[in-house]
Amino acid sequence: MSVELHRPLLIGQIPTLGTHFNVEATPSECSALALRMGLPEVLELRCRFHLHRESNTIIRASGVLHARVVQTCVISLEDFETTVEESFTVRFVPSGTENDDLDPESEDEIPYENGILDLGEAAAEQLGLALDPYPRMPDAELPEIEEEPEPHPFAALDRLRRPN
């Protein structure tokens, strides 16, 4: 269970035809998520889920994540605000029944226990996956590094030969 963003939903509350569920983080939850994600700030996080049953115990969730965060530029080390928009699909499965498939193209599975899905934690995980691991401020450029010419192997002899 996530202490940062907890939105429990009983699996039994999901109708056969599916349902929508919205998660919106409060300011204190945003602060806790920023700390968890190593960000200067999470300004806003919203996530819309569409849930439908694959079976009695497996729930497929497609969703859209929207977040505004402050990240630190890897080039200038300045903080800057950026928007994260991400569509995703995950499957909620009973704990212990996760697929061991390491295929990066397969859908992510999120385990649940006692018939309770945590859509807040799912939203937090999607934010973590969607963040740029090497954030770069718009228009940030690497500084030009002037390379010193490599010294000639006989440069030391040349200095000895010249009068001071």
Image (cartoon, rainbow, N blue to C red):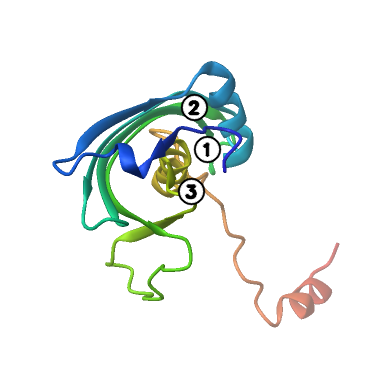
Q: Position of residue 122 (x, y in %)?
A: 42, 43
Can you say which quadrant of the picture contains the N terminus? top right
Pointer 3: residues within 10 angstroms few (<14), some, or many (20+)?
few
Q: Residue at x 29, y 61 (%)?
A: 107
Q: At label 1, which amino acid type do we have?
A: Cys
Q: Assign a secondary structure to mark 3.
A: loop
Q: Residue at x 61, y 29 (%)?
A: 32
Q: Is residue 152 or residue 67 the one in the foreground?
A: 67
Q: Position of residue 145 (x, y in %)?
A: 56, 51
Q: CA distance from mark 3 to mark 1?
A: 8 Å
Q: Assign a secondary structure to mark 1.
A: loop
Q: Position of residue 25 (x, y in %)?
A: 46, 24
Q: Is residue 126 or residue 73 the one in the foreground?
A: 126
Q: CA distance from mark 2 to mark 1?
A: 7 Å
Residue tagged 1: 73
Pointer 2: residues within 10 angstroms few (<14), some, or many (20+)?
some
Vertical position of residue 17 compared to residue 147: above or below: above
Q: Is residue 131 or residue 151 the one in the foreground?
A: 131
Dividing the picture into quarters, in which one does residue 74 lie? top right
Number of numbered discs visible in the structure rendering: 3
Residue tagged 3: 134
N-terminal-most mark, 3 or 1: 1
Q: Are marks 2 and 1 in contact (CB under 8 Å)?
A: yes
Can you say which quadrant of the picture contains the C terminus? bottom right
Q: CA distance from mark 3 to mark 2?
A: 13 Å
Q: Which mark is residue 80?
A: 2
Dividing the picture into quarters, in which one does residue 38 lie? top right
Q: Residue at x 46, y 46 (%)?
A: 125
